[in-house]
Amino acid sequence: MDRYEEMAQKMAGMPEDELKKTVSSLMARCICGKCPTYNDCMKGKKEALFCALGKSACAITKKACLCPACPVTSMLGLKHGYYCIKGSEKELRGL
Ligand code: SF4
Ligand code: SF4
């Protein structure tokens, strides 16, 4: 089991209030808002943390992805990127 799988298992077992706090703390660290791909539609919908919450509901033009430089990538052991377009780490791993 790698870091991501351990973290996903831990989060799956969390009570709802603890899970909400964890998601808020990850959201605060997400750097999507500084990414060239992040557009006005995503901003308007207050979307972020696509690695955990899944893809955006907006139409997106792919420009660059800052996920590899994001602190959440090392915290959760993420291995992908462009989550706003492709879906969550869980989906991309087929879990
Ligand atoms: S890895 Fe990407 S989607 Fe996930 S929190 Fe960081 S910038 Fe946002
Ligand atoms: S998931 Fe990656 S490409 Fe999409 S907005 Fe966040 S940093 Fe940019």
Image: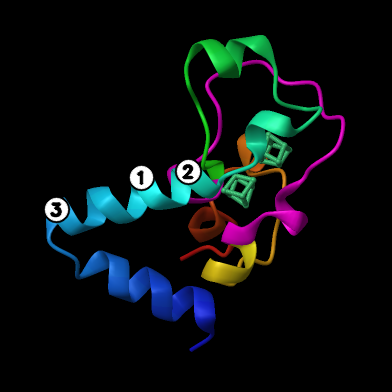
Asked if the residue under mark 2 is in contact with the one under mark 3, i.e. CB atoms within 8 Å, the reply is: no
- All told, the count of numbered labels is 3
Tell whether 8 sits left or right of 92.
left
Tell whether 87 sits left or right of 11.
right
Task: Give the structural element (helix, strand or loop) at label 1.
Answer: helix
Read off the magenta span: 51-72
* Displayed quadrant of residue 30: top right
Q: Nearer the viewer, residue 28 or 47?
A: 28
Considering only order in the chain, which callout, 1 or 3, is on the residue closer to the N terminus?
Answer: 3
61 in the magenta segment: yes
**Residue 24 — which label?**
1
Residue corresponding to mark 3: 16
15 in the magenta segment: no
How was the colour assigned to the protein in this rendering?
A: rainbow
Q: Is residue 9 above or below residue 12?
A: below
- The chief SS type of the magenta part is loop
The CA distance from mark 3 to mark 1 is 12 Å
Task: Give the structural element (helix, strand or loop) at label 2.
Answer: helix
The kind of residue tagged 1 is Ser
The CA distance from mark 3 to mark 2 is 18 Å
**Residue 28 — which label?**
2
Tell whether 68 sits left or right of 64.
left
